[in-house]
Image (cartoon, grey):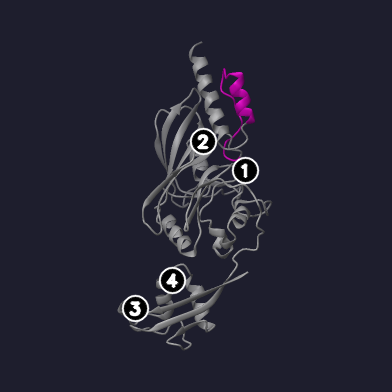
Amino acid sequence: MIQPISYTLTLTAEFQGKRLDATVSQLLKQYSRNLIKQWILEGKLLLNGKAAKPKDPVSENDEIIIEATLESQISNPAQSLPLEIVFEDEQLLVINKPPGLVVHPGAGNQDHTLLNALLHYDPALEYLPRAGIVHRLDKETSGLMVIAKTLETHTYLIDLMQHHEVKRTYEAVIWGPCISGATIDAPMGRHPKQRIRMAVVNGGKPAVTHFRLIERFREHTHVRVMLETGRTHQIRVHMAHIRHPVVGDPVYGGRFKLPPKATEELIAELRGFKRQALHAAELTLEHPITHEQMTWKAPLPQDIQNLLICLKSDTTKNASK
């Protein structure tokens, strides 16, 4: 599908002598500079009523007229899938993603993803890169995600992400009783031998994770985790690196084990827990229009709640023996 767009811009003195493409890119930050350059070369962007070149200088009171079109960014089908909407306005959509839902279509997951669901919920998102998705959660990680609903907001959120100005707080259940929280500062990159995995590696990209205790059990700990950086699988890799892998993690969790003297209920719960016990519980960012600091929270899903109940019961029963 094609969406027409139209702009008339009158330049102020601050742009005197600047390149045409750079000027328009600064004024219309929602569009990439390459797209703006394409409009100029195709004659869809006129300077004072005439065709121009991207490098042409502009002057105060110059008039720029744009009559162009936006083509759909996505070829994936829209599909009706349930979405838990936590917040929505004209700029943002915040959802609570359930475990098991893939964010983007890819090998082995061509449809029934969050992207397909978003296209059905709001067809206008097809004109945005990745249907407005600006960050991701692993398939089996639950919790909060923010979606851009306009190109301006998409650009704004990407900028916030790049400057680490979006605060994401997770909750996780990890193996081993921790005495205190800590900061993990360990660079990450592709695993040197298993390329589908990430790992702590020398010369990797900087990765910093902070975690604090919520509750300690006999052989497990419930923690709150704050990301300073956003590397792929960062929490899962970092927790495994310090020998406290996330419960249920099929990739980084290591060999399955049971705590000594575990109750039957806990044994059954651990055997049946088939995903990483990781949940994006809180999301804080500055609103793109009002610039208000906004925070959203999502309660732990029922499977992690059930796990915590069993861990608490196991700790209490073993303490009384």
Q: On screen, 316 above or below 174?
A: above
Question: Counting residues from the N terminus, which is met first, the one under dot 4 or under dot 3?
Answer: 3
- Magenta range is 251-272
Q: Which of 268 and 125 is in front in this view?
A: 125
Q: Where is residue 232 in the image (x, y as percent from the top left)?
A: 52, 49
Q: Pointer 4 and pointer 2: residues touching (CB < 8 Å)?
A: no
Q: Where is residue 58 in the image (x, y as percent from the top left)?
A: 37, 83
Element at label 1: loop
Residue 300 tag number: 2
Residue 15 tag number: 3
Which residue was labeled with disc 4?
28
Question: Counting residues from the N terminus, which is met first, the one under dot 4 or under dot 1?
Answer: 4
* Cα distance between the residues tagged 1 and 3: 50 Å
Q: On screen, 57 above or below 166?
A: below
Amino acid on which the number 1 mark rests in the picture:
Gly
* Cα distance between the residues tagged 2 and 1: 15 Å
Which residue was labeled with disc 1?
100
Q: Pointer 4 and pointer 3: residues touching (CB < 8 Å)?
A: no
